[in-house]
Every structure is written in structure tokens, then in C-alpha cells.
């Protein structure tokens, strides 16, 4: 019996040693995952500073010979109206994000806090749209846009992006977490439904709104397939369409493609840095982690 406390102490000692080991293993796995994600972006950024002979050099080198070489970026703007492409993408992504925020917040409020006949059927029917591949509706959508005379226009490009089904789902989940007592107290104080939506609901779901804004902005910014279908004139091209202008069927100018890719990523990175606090809060609130 006298040996039992010593055995327990040994077990506790082994457990205490295993905790730091588990933390180190977890940290090592997280660091390895982060490096795996970050390395391609670092490689692209460094390649954008290299000359074509440096890119083709064998063995491959990670760093450029001259860190201040910005000639590739100047050549991007000389070869194509890239500033116009950036402006088009920024305009389209901003309008798409704003319209999605308004529609998704209103629809999410309705589905989260009101009960009406067919409530569940309508909600699951909307969510079911997420399962439909966009390519399967491209032809009827193109015919609809063409008959309205919206080909090669901003409104024609925005047609499928003005409303976000994912946004409706996200906002419904966020608004459901707002206590009903807050809404009841506002009604007792004489606040109308629009006042409740503006003064109670929206301030409570600001992190979810910020998350939806950045996700929708990023989706529209990176959209390539639909603009390729409806855009004809060079002045209406977006950033993603401008990137393929530096490639042809015989060769790819990697120095220019990587410089243009870095320019196309910077606006999204800037927006994420500004809104990251609310994005993390929304991920915790709505259980979107992982």
C-alpha cells in the first residue's frame, strides 16, 4: 500500500510530460499546415520580381537576384489596361457584396424570427439551390440576359451575383442566436419591425455581416466563367480575364502572370486585414470553423 502514492506520482509525472509533448506536436502540425498554405503565395510573389532567365534557371532558385526589380509590374500595365480591369472587378465585387448583404440580412431575419405557412419548405428549397451546379443553368441564364439586352454590361455580369443563397443561410444562423427577449423588449418600447431590424438585429450580427461581405467580395472578384461568357469588349474585362492575356497557346510569360496575380490578390488581402476581427468573431458565433 505504501507504494501506491509513488505509482500515482509516476503516472502524474508521465501525464505532465505528455502535455507539453502534445502541445509541441500540435504546434508543429499547425506550423506545417500554415507553411503549406503560405509557400505558394511566397513563391508567386518572389517570382514576380525575377527576370525570365532567372525563372528558367536550373536548379530553381527561390529568391530573385535583385529585390527591387519592379519591371514586371510596369510591363503588366504597359501590355494591358490592367488598371481598368482592377476598377471593373472592384466595382462589380463591391455592388455584389452590398446587394447580397441587404437581401441576405432581410431574408435571414424573416426565416429566423417569423413563422409563416411553408416556412421550412421555402427555406430548404432556397438552401437546395446550393446543390445545383452553376454550369447547369448557364444556358438559360445567358438567354435571359441576352433577351434583356444586358450582354457586355455591368448589370449582365452581376445578374447571378446580386443575391447570395449562402448569405441567406449564414444570416439566418446568425440572427437565430439573437435572443427573442431583445426583440420583445423593443416592441414593448414601441419600436417597429424596421426599427428592430436596424437598431437591434443588425448591430448584433455585425461579425456575420463582415464575414459575408468579404466572402461575397472574394467570390465575385475571383469569378471567371460567367464574365467570360457575357463579356465581349476589352473595356468590360475583369482581373481574372486580364490574367489570361499574358498566356497563349505556345508559351506563358510567368514573370508577367505572377506580377499580375500579385496585383489581383492585394485588394482582397487588404479587405481581409481590415475585417479579420469580425470574421473571427463570426466564425466562433456561427460554428463555421473547419
Image (cartoon, rainbow, N blue to C red):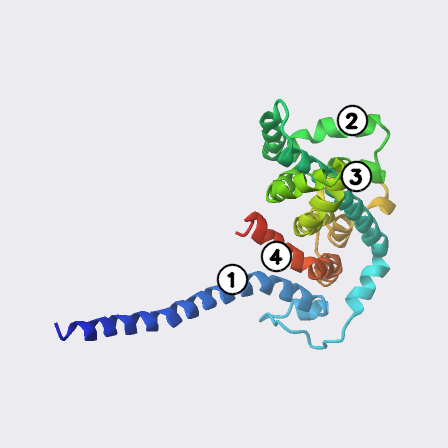
Instruction: Name the residue furthest left.
Output: 1
Q: Which mark is residue 185?
A: none
Question: In the rendered image, which residue does mark 3 sit on?
Answer: 157
- Please tell me which of labels 2 and 4 falls first in the chain: 2
Q: CA distance from mark 1 to mark 3?
A: 36 Å
Q: Nearer the viewer, residue 64 or 163?
A: 163
Q: Which mark is residue 144?
A: 2
> Residue at horizontal 62%, vertical 52%?
282
> Residue at horizontal 37%, vertical 69%?
19
From this view, report whether residue 93 is shown above or below residue 270. Answer: above
Q: Residue 50: horizontal and vertical position, in percent?
A: 71, 70
Nearest to the eye among marks 4 and 3: give it.
Answer: 4
Q: Which mark is residue 280?
A: 4
Q: CA distance from mark 1 to mark 2?
A: 44 Å
Q: Secondary structure at mark 1?
A: helix
Picture quadrant of residue 148: top right
Question: In the rendered image, which residue does mark 1 sit on?
Answer: 33
Q: Secondary structure at mark 4?
A: helix
Q: Residue 30: horizontal and vertical position, in percent?
A: 49, 64
Amino acid at each position: 500500500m505504501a507504494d501506491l502514492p509513488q505509482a500515482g506520482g509516476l503516472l502524474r509525472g508521465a501525464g505532465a510530460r505528455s502535455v507539453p509533448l502534445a502541445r509541441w506536436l500540435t504546434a508543429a502540425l499547425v506550423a506545417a499546415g500554415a507553411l503549406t498554405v503560405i509557400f505558394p503565395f511566397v513563391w508567386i510573389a518572389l517570382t514576380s520580381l525575377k527576370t525570365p532567365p532567372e525563372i528558367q534557371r536550373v536548379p530553381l532558385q527561390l529568391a530573385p537576384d535583385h529585390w527591387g526589380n519592379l519591371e514586371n509590374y510596369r510591363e503588366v500595365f504597359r501590355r494591358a489596361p490592367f488598371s481598368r480591369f482592377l476598377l471593373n472587378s472592384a466595382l462589380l465585387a463591391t455592388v455584389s457584396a452590398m446587394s447580397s448583404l441587404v437581401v441576405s440580412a432581410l431574408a435571414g431575419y424573416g426565416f429566423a424570427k417569423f413563422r409563416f405557412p411553408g416556412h421550412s419548405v421555402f427555406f430548404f428549397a432556397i438552401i437546395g439551390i446550393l446543390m445545383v451546379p452553376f454550369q447547369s443553368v448557364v444556358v438559360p441564364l445567358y438567354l435571359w440576359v441576352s433577351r434583356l439586352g444586358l450582354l457586355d454590361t455591368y448589370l449582365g455580369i452581376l445578374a447571378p451575383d446580386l443575391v447570395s443563397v449562402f448569405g441567406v443561410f449564414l444570416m439566418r444562423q446568425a440572427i437565430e442566436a439573437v435572443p427573442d427577449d431583445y426583440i420583445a423588449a423593443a416592441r414593448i418600447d414601441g419600436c417597429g419591425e424596421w426599427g428592430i431590424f436596424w437598431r437591434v438585429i443588425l448591430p448584433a450580427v455585425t461579425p456575420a455581416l463582415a464575414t459575408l461581405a468579404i466572402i461575397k467580395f472574394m467570390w465575385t472578384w475571383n469569378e471567371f466563367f460567367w464574365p467570360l461568357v457575357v463579356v465581349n469588349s476589352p473595356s468590360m474585362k475583369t482581373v481574372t480575364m486580364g490574367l489570361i492575356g499574358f498566356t497563349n497557346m505556345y508559351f506563358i510569360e510567368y514573370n508577367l502572370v505572377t506580377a499580375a496575380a500579385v496585383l489581383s490578390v492585394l485588394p482582397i488581402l487588404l479587405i481581409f486585414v481590415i475585417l479579420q476581427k469580425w470574421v473571427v468573431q463570426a466564425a466562433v458565433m456561427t460554428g463555421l470553423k473547419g
